[in-house]
Image: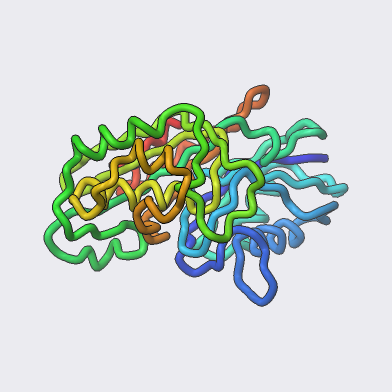
Amino acid sequence: MKFVGACEYDGSSFSGFQSQKNARSVQGALEKAISSVGRLTNKINYSGRTDAGVHSLGQVFDFESVDSRTIDQWLRGINSALPESISVTSLQEAPKDFHSRFDAIKRTYAYIIYAGPTRPIFLKDYVLWEKNKIDIDLMKHEASFLLGTHNFNSFRGSKCTANNPVRTIDSIEISVKEDFITVTVTANAYLYNMVRIIVGTLLERSSGRLQTGMQDILKSENRVNAGKTAQAQGLFFLGAEYKNFSLTKSTRSNSFLSLLLPFNQ
């Protein structure tokens, strides 16, 4: 039987989501926890790969098992075997041919920036502290050029292995609440480090450190023209959307993050 679930995790102490040799991964922890409840037929599939230090509030994953368990038994058993930094928030049966990655039509990320005057000690693992003055109106104007289907070569990391750099950004929203700025991006797919490079470029443009406009950077299709890659800790993977399958929504409300992130994705 196949199951699909959603999980949230604090990526601070992981080498990333994907399993790696001699490194602590979210995928490895999930597979170990699932295997403690029932036999896994294969490795789990997942909707989006996140790097070291990147967090998630809605990573979608699916797995198959020949063992018979109720949803409640799976959910309780898996969560009891997971480290405190990972939690499975929903689980349900899925069609046999469902695939978390290949069936996803949209994925959403949010990046949190703290623009307060002093270092946010207790939030250092979850926000980017930007010390330069930020022009929000300019950020929004520059971000608008990224909407639609483009060649995003200017915003791909050096380790990117994608053959096709063309992606479609459906929406990019910039919201402000007190000293927090959240950049939320929804696209069909992403290149390696794409969101973090976009955020880094927007910050450099808004502060005047980068003179080349976003439209020209995009047209150049050259990474050297864009800004620096923003640090990992401010990035959150919010989840994926599917055309012919609806995921059970978690009713959980995180008191701090719910003020900043669009949980209604």
Number of numbered tags placed on the structure image? 0
- Give how far across and how far down residue 150 sits, in percent: 50, 33
- Give how far across and how far down residue 246 sits, in percent: 62, 27
The residue drawn where x is 68% and y is 36% is 92
Residue 245 vs residue 255, the one in the foreground: 245
The residue drawn where x is 56% and y is 62% is 16
Q: As drawn, which residue projects farthest toward the front? A: 220
Which image quadrant: the C terminus? top left
Q: What colour scheme does the image use? A: rainbow
The residue drawn where x is 39% and y is 58% is 229
**Relative horizontal placement of residue 115, taking residue 36 as reference (left or right):** left
Residue 222 vs residue 39, the one in the foreground: 222
Q: As drawn, which residue projects farthest toward the bottom? A: 22
Splitting the image into 4 quarters, where does residue 31 fall? bottom right
**Relative horizontal placement of residue 161, taking residue 1 as reference (left or right):** left
- Give how far across and how far down residue 1 sits, in percent: 83, 40
Residue 198 vs residue 57, the one in the foreground: 198
Give the answer, above or below, for where 244 lies relative to 141: above
The residue drawn where x is 51% and y is 64% is 52
Give the answer, above or below, for where 251 lies relative to 115: above
**Relative horizontal placement of residue 149, taking residue 185 as reference (left or right):** right
- Give how far across and how far down residue 214 sits, in percent: 33, 40
Give the answer, above or below, for where 32 lies relative to 102: below
Q: As drawn, which residue projects farthest toward the top? A: 244
**Relative horizontal placement of residue 218, taking residue 91 as reference (left or right):** left
Q: As drawn, which residue projects farthest toward the right? A: 66
